[in-house]
Image (cartoon, rainbow, N blue to C red):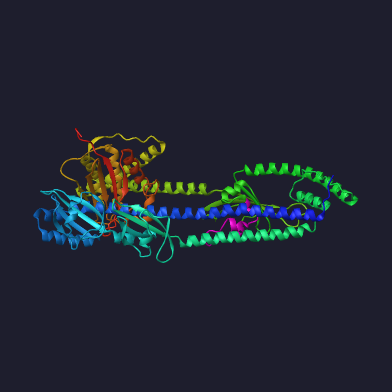
Amino acid sequence: MYEKKPFSQLRSQLVIAFLASTLGIAIAIGIPVVLLINRQAASQTRLLLDQATLTTQASLAREESDLQNLALLISQRPTLKQYVEQNNSASINSYLDTLRKSVNLDLLIVCDGDHRLIGASTGSESAELCRVEDQSGYLPASAGHDSLLFATGDVQNTSASYKVFLGKNLPSVLTQLQQETGLLYMLRETGQAIASSNNVLNVSSLPASGEARVRGVDGKIYAINQIVLNSNLDLVGALNVEEQVQTQNELSRTLILGLVFIVLVAFVLALWLSQRISSPLNHLATVAADFSHGNLRSPVTIQSGTWEIGQLANTLEDARVALQHSMDQLQSEKTWVEHILNSIVEGILTMDGQNQITFASAGMSRIAGVELEEMIGQKIDDIFLPVESEISLSNQLPAAGQQQNILVKLQNGQEKLLSISRARLVPPEARSSSDALVIRDVSNEEYIHRFLGDFLANITHEFRTPLAALEASSELLLDNLHELSVEELEELLSSLNLGIVDLQTLIDNLIEAASIEAGRFKVSQRPVAFDSILADALKIILPLAEKYKLRLETTSPGEKSVLVLADHRRTVQVLVNLLSNAVKHSPEYGLIQVKYYGTCEQLCVEVRDQGSGIPLDTRPLLFKRFATLNASAGKAMHGTGLGLSVVKAIVEAQGGEVGLLDPDQADRGASFWFTLPLVKETGQ
């Protein structure tokens, strides 16, 4: 039996319960959210600072590496060696001063084997630096110089031992780092600040070990991090987090005020509702609320002494049973239909007369990259955007019963080609109709179709050009053999040879690419003189270079032959591919250089041309298959895009590396390099 309680008691219980639950929810949501905001802000600040610190460390490492490379290059300059051997101090000082200014150094000196200063650029006369034993690193400030980032290089092939010492002032390096990373920097020596990229930080408030945050002279908050350079020097990086702190405080304050407002609104609402509720009507309202939310499982069990309320309860129970039966049938059919639609790869959606989406399948969500819940109710033109100045998708849809391919842009910026079919749905006894679209993503099919067409066109062109030349030369030989002079015969035979070389190179690249793709690519490495590999490659490429009036120049480390562990035929193919690219991209009467020199365990080979260079945006695609670049004017503009990918596969299969050097400012030509393992001498 339903127990009737006094109205005042029920009202009090409702108000207390409603207010308590609201407060509990507010506290349960507010406290974790505030903590989450604080933790997220601190985590984001630390992440930004760590990323900037990593960038700083990478920049310092790159600067140190550049100095090491520069020291090696300076130490190998013939003019410097000559002045050192002549012990001409005036010439050495003048040469070093000019060299220091040209390479933007702050210090450049030359020391002998006894750690004595024998030459220095202007402002670099610090003999104590000659006693530094390290190859590179950081030096604290001392008499005669500031804190330095330095590197040394030995002067070779002289009668005595000498070394070059060069360096940059760390304060100037800090200024450059601030522009790159956005951090403020302070250089400290044994805990005392000696240089700063900005005077905002308060030196006296900065502890030796560093704090998570400090307040600068300008009153702003900075997050700091410490980078240890050596035992005496460390670098403190500071990130301005004043804006993040203010945003964090504003979010927390706004959240708290919003929760307080919600609690007040809930309290007022509870008072108003409690005044309008009585015992039996409260139960009927609860049952009706369950019905509105789809809860038809619970029976209506309201009992009341009032006949009208009892009849209303019985009527509601009959309606609940009938609705439950109908809902079960509809849910079963709906589940089955949704299962079928979601199992279809193509996307299916329906939209009303205002182009708003009323239904979307799982396939539609995969194609659009948008969750189903977010799609329902949106216009189709907001999901699929027009490409550049194209008209909206709703104005491009095909007629009912037809199909059309349409290029669209997704919300993430990705472009896709969609095949769209349209059907018109007119429900019975409905005043308005809706449209159903079946959408299939055909972007990959279109891409593969274009890719195969372009590749076949390039292959056809690459075969047709040398074959046409071979055909023309052979016809001339057959028709006018007895009338041709020796020079004309040599020219025709040279043309035939070039055509054969082009075809052989193309076929070799195609064969190697096929073997790489099939996983059957192998190399047969044996000790071989690199001079013989280079000679065979030059023999193949020389006629092509002469045709375009190009000069070939080779530079070796010495007269002694260098033995490498390599596959002779495939290494020749590597050089031929690189030299062929150099010929294609070199201007007439240009110079193509082949340099090679040995390191500890590898031979480094460099092929340099004087062409227009390679744009930065195309460099990541250089060694990928089917990537092609335009050649110089007057030469072939096609290619299979296999040459450099084959070069990379052959070099790496032999334990080497391949890459592209940055161009010089005076000559923007491309400079490719690769390495080969050296044959270790007996006894090593």
Q: Quadrant of the N terminus?
A: top right
Query: Which residue shows up at 71% across the image and 44% down it?
Result: 334
**Is residue 155 rendered magenta in the image?**
no
Is residue 380 positioned above or below 514 on the image?
A: below
- Horizontal and vertical percent position of residue 513: 38, 40
- Horizontal and vertical percent position of residue 611: 29, 56
State which quadrant residue 238 falls in.
Answer: bottom left
Single out the residue that lies furthest toward the right. 307
Foreground of the two, 342 or 97 = 97
Residues in magenta, as a range: 373-395
- Mark count: 0
Foreground of the two, 6 or 509 = 6
Is 20 left, or right, of 450 in this rendering? right
Is 34 left, or right, of 264 in this rendering? left
Is residue 514 positioned above or below 192 on the image?
A: above
Is residue 168 positioned above or below 523 on the image?
A: below
Single out the residue that lies furthest toward the bottom. 218
Query: Which residue shows up at 67% across the image and 54% down it?
Result: 22
State which quadrant residue 332 falls in.
Answer: top right
Query: Which residue shows up at 66% across the image and 42% down it?
Result: 339
Q: Quadrant of the C terminus?
A: top left
- Horizontal and vertical percent position of residue 333: 72, 42
- Horizontal and vertical percent position of residue 245: 49, 60
**Is residue 380 rendered magenta in the image?**
yes
Residue 374 visible to an observer of this rendering: no
Is 255 left, or right, of 94 in this rendering? right
Residue 327 visible to an observer of this rendering: yes
